[in-house]
Amino acid sequence: MAPEDTRSDTAAGHGGAPPGRTTGAWVTVGVLLAVGIVVPLLVFLYDQEKPTLWGFPFYYWFQFALIPVVSVLTYTAFRIAERATARDRRAHGLGPAAGRKGGFQ
């Protein structure tokens, strides 16, 4: 028979929300990144020729327009993840990540 763990669920790392919980931030990161993955896969959104832009059919220029949009979403997700990681590390008593002094500036 294994000895019983007398620690609380929070102390054992199970259940309970530690102070400064960042679940919302990580959900936001996931949603931002999912948009950049899912939207290009939804071909029915852009499988038409009209409207054209400078002679380019919609299906071309829409995909080109997604590049800066997804880049901004990815950068935003990165910055949110960086802050959430710093909060998580502080909440668990860890210092800044190796090679970092407060993150990117």
Image: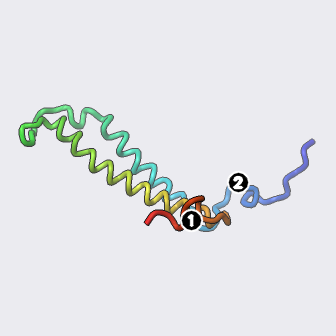
Residue at 43% from the left image edge and 66% from the top image edge: 105
The local secondary structure at tag 1 comes to helix
Q: Residues within 10 Å of mark 1 (few under 14, many from 20)?
A: some
Residue at 32% from the left image edge and 40% from the top image edge: 39
Residues 12 and 85: in front is 85
Q: CA distance from mark 2 to mark 1?
A: 19 Å
Which x, y percent locates residue 89? 61, 62
Which x, y percent locates residue 73? 35, 52
- Number of on-image labels: 2
Name the residue that disc number 2 marks.
14
Residue 38 horizontal side relative to residue 99, left or right? left
* Residue at the farthest left position: 55
The local secondary structure at tag 2 comes to loop
Residue 97 horizontal side relative to residue 43, left or right? right
Give the position of the N terminus as an image quadrant. Answer: top right
Q: Amino acid at mark 2?
A: His
Name the residue that disc number 1 marks.
87
Find residue 58 and report its image quarter. top left
Which x, y percent locates residue 2? 90, 44
Residue 80, relative to residue 37: is it above or below?
Answer: below
Residue 42 horizontal side relative to residue 96, left or right? left
Residue 103, relative to residue 27: is it above or below?
Answer: below
Q: Amino acid at mark 1?
A: Arg
Mark closest to the chain's N terminus, 2 or 1: 2
Find residue 93 and report its image quarter. bottom right
Marker disc for residue 105: none
